[in-house]
Amino acid sequence: MPYVAARDGRQQRGPNDRAPSVPDSLDDLHGHSVGVLELPRHMAAGHRSRRLLNLEDPAQQRQAYQTVLCQAADCCEINDLLNPGVLRRIWRHLHLPAKVRQEWEKRHPALARPALGEQAPMIDTAELASARSGPGADGFRRAPRRTRGDRLTAKQMIVARTASAR
């Protein structure tokens, strides 16, 4: 596989083949948490519109953080582009190569997921049940099935279609 010399002289073979850049402290990160993030050209090729990601849209925010974590050339780029609070909040939802995730979690154990032997935090089922039955809890309730009396006959459907076409 051919390689492209990076700006800093390293041989870049892709995000899976090079060591990920991980800053010493999450407190060094000082990126914005809202607004539009413009990725550098070497992180996202193509038109400028492909490099502009809205940090207020959760999907675009995850895409931006995944791209920066995988493609950053050095820690300075990570420090400038990522926000520590946002990174902590969405870390578990990012789809990262195993190598990148391991390096970040090794350097910053607070980001690591609980191990298999560790107990997940307990959820109070009474609190959960009260939240489901409280006011406004029917937002995701399925619409009831129609009964036979609610169905239209073929003649009624034809009349309704012709009336709406007029």
Image (cartoon, grey):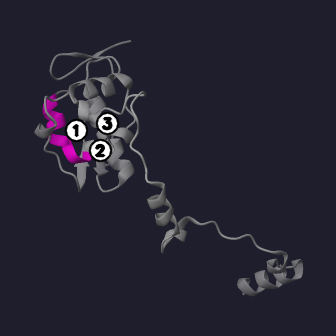
In the rendered view, tell whether residue 73 sits above or below residue 157. Answer: above
Q: Residue at x 52, y 68 (%)?
A: 133
In terms of sequence position, does the residue under pointer 2 or pointer 3 come before the other? 2
Q: How many marks?
A: 3
Residue drawn at (35%, 13%) of the image: 2
Can you see residue 53?
A: yes
Magenta portion: prevailing SS class:
helix
| Label 1, residues with CA under 10 Å away: few <14, some 14-19, many ≥20 | some
Question: Residue 95's x, y, as percent?
Answer: 40, 35
Q: Is 101 placed left or right of 156 in the picture? A: left
Q: Report x, y in % for residue 69.
A: 27, 33
Type of amino acid at the residue the image marks with label 1? Pro
Instruction: Tell me the tag on residue 67.
Output: 3
| Residue where numbered disc 1 is placed | 40
Instruction: Let me know if residue 77 is in the magenta part.
Output: yes
Q: Amino acid at mark 2?
A: Arg
Name the one closer to the observer, 137 or 128. 128
Q: Secondary structure at mark 1?
A: loop
Q: Which mark is residue 51?
A: 2
Magenta residues span 75-86
Q: CA distance from mark 2 to mark 3?
A: 10 Å
> Percent position (x, y) of residue 164?
71, 84
Packing grade of label 3 (10 A; few <14, some 14-19, many >=20) is some
